[in-house]
Image (cartoon, helix red, strand yellow):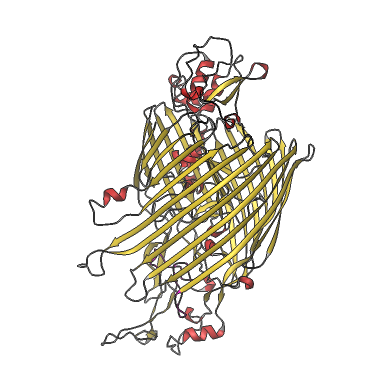
Amino acid sequence: MRERVVAMVLVGAAAVLGAPSTAFGQAEQKTYVGRAVVDALEELQTSTLKLIFSSELVPPSLRVTKEPKGTDPQKIALQILEPHGLTLREGPSGTLIVVRRRPGAEASKPAATESGPSPPAPTDDERKPLRIEEHVDVVERPDTAEGSRGYSVEPEAVREMAGGLDNVIQSLAVLPGVAAVSDDDGRLAVRGAGPEHNMVVLDGVQIHNVQRMGEWTTSFLNPATAAAISLDPSGLDARFGGRLSSVVNLETRDGRTDRKLAASGSVGLVSADVLIEGRMPNTTSGSWWATLRGTHYRLVRDRFEDSVMPSFVDLQAKATLHPSKTTRLTLFGLAGRETREQLEGGIRGDEPPEINESNEGENRIASGTLRWIPSPRFSSTTTVSAYANDSRSRDNLLQTWVDPYDRRLAIHDYAVRHQMLMAWSQGRLIDAGVDLHRVTSSWKMQGIKTQEWWRGVGPSTTGEGIDYLAGPIDSRLERTQAGAWFQVGFDAGRFATIEPGVRVDWNSYTGEASWQPRLRVSRAFGTTSVWAGISLQAQTPSHESLLGFQFFELPTDGSTLRNERTRQIVLGVERPLGGGFAARVEGYVRSFDRLLVQRLETDAERATRLTQYIIPPDLPADAVILEHRPTVFPESTGTGRATGLEVLVRRERGRVTGWAGYTLAKSTRDLYGYTVPSDFDRRHALSVVMEVTPMRRVRAAMTWQIASGFPITPVQEEVDFGRVVDLNGVLDPLYRTFRSRGRLVTFPDVLHRRLSTINAARLSGYQRGDARVTYSTLGHWEFYFEVLNALNNRNSRYTLVETNDAGEQVEIGKANVYETFERMYSYGLRVRF
């Protein structure tokens, strides 16, 4: 049945994506508002009107905001471009080139087919003396860019994506090769690696916490300020280092320079934002923007209900200046605070509600980037940054029998980065640079946090399986990390574009210097691009990388540990298919070694643990309590392997745009003598993201995902141990067994699971469909309504069974391992002035 559903959806998606524009009726062909600018310009092309434009100035996400008047194609093109600060300039051989219009200048009249209106009177800005920076036209970095670098998502696509909730990280979770750990915590597992193996970079600054706390919050980045969002799932560029898996590269845009002051904002289900921006006074090229973003529903709901909702508020600002003809200075700052408190009733029904769970966090970023470009063939960029993230999580639900859960994590990263790019000839580029980090971090923890489902294999990052016999966890680290890279790209005649490179990273924690060679080769066969790559990557153990399930109490002296490593090979092909479609296929093979693994107990440690138990003589020899159990102490002995094939079909122009992606993958780990699926192994995953513009004022979007369930260690029946309280209220210090009719009592043990069955079962498959409809007034206002999990699927389910008196396995219940949600409705309002 599932195969039929998948086939029907695929056929339907292909039919909709392939529908020509005429399918929506001829009457709509002459309207432009809401359509992509790139489509409108291509439609306006005639034998006498030839338009040339770049995807940088006219990206697929750029929309027509005002309906043009008249019938002349050239005038229509100008009226479409002008609201975006663009115009037309005469080019060679009678062509017209789309260029950025200088603020304050009159609209361009590139051709003499019709005489335009008289020039307007000079404005106040035009009468002011020009500063030297106003004539600076800084070229962007040269780039060979012939081979594919990864996946990209347009910022506007994030805002339009059904179910995305304006969350940049959520938009990446539906790409091939990416698995979201849950629906709302922002952790991603990419190509067989774990969430701890991903790097997030914002304007050259590494970010260690990308997601706000609590359910249904959002990422730190406001999509309205984003210029580029990309995911390199293989991380083949030598300029990035320190992680084994992927690189999420985020770039913010400059403020608007065509206006002194502009304002926009939005209100959605989970957050609201206000953005103001404009041109720096007395300049035409300097710009700034500032945005305030945060939750709004807490202020409203607290007035009507005796509960506390999660909240966050971020203030971000960016300024861009050109101090001279060849320099560009960018300053960026972020300050934010987040809280989350959950009220629940007491253990007895007559008890008043109390706070049983709370989260607090502060995020601060300050960075400055100076780019020097003395010529179009050379650029030098220096970034200085300071990053701080401090968070605390508490849980009092289990305070009746264990210390309240309290975890504090602090990460402070001070860094400097310098990059040089030189294109000494056509198609030949050198990328070299260095970066230096001073990182201080601490991890303090006590107690156990309540979970949707206990992991039960080894000590976890939420306190499960930690005995705290030596007291609460209090781990502090300081390290210096330095890196350098050199990568060159050149055209080897007609053979291929070759990009060899090497990166070396040294850190004071493990004392290692890791050499990481990289090689990428790409070749174009007409419109088809083919590429292959090989690399070695390394990652240093750290507190900021404890994003998986396993907890490691990292020693102050890391000389006993090694850098984690991965070797990988990738091979891919991409080509246009016609009708606005393009297809991409990429396969990969990865091998992991030196992975952190929780060391098993020694015989002495096991004997000490068993002193807490009264072991009966008839206890089965294979009882889980007798195993050598994992400890909090790490060792660099883990290995693994990952293979996969990813297919992506994308359409970027037309009334129907979007993509469909499929992933076939397998990821394993070698643990304690067993080869098992990794925690986030997902064999099959299919996603479809579409946006449809059926009429001028209405846009519709759909996101649909279906995937295999994650592995899980099954719960088995074990001999039940417990502690009892005597008549005087004294807790027995020892764990004892219980008997029924002379036999040891067994019970499904959710806290202790056998090492021989690690990840031997699977959760139920994942399926979710979201839909959105947007209505635009074609002016300042837009309204949208969406349904999340429209089919009300219950995901990540686990079936619990036990053995009855007849020796039969019977189901005793189902539970969600990850937090899930039922059908939910969302709404939003956007305004721009």
Q: Is residue 420 left or right of residue 549?
A: right
> 727 or 556, which lies in front?
556
Q: The C terminus appears in which quarter of the rendering?
A: top left
Q: Is residue 728 above or below residue 466?
A: below
Image spot of residue 525 (x, y percent): 72, 36
- Image quadrant in which you'd find residue 722: bottom left
Name the magenta segment's main secondary structure: loop
Check the image and name the residue furthest to the left. 350
Q: Taking the image as drawn, is residue 420 in sight? A: yes
> 34 or 540, which lies in front?
540
Range of residues picked out in magenta: 448-472
Q: Is residue 352 above or below residue 581?
A: below
Q: Is residue 672 above or below residue 587?
A: below
Q: Is residue 788 left or right of residue 546?
A: left
Residue pictured at 48% horizontal, 63% vertical: 410
**How many dots with numbers?**
0
Q: Is residue 746 above or below residue 791?
A: below
Check the image and name the residue furthest to the front. 129
> 401 or 84, which lies in front?
84
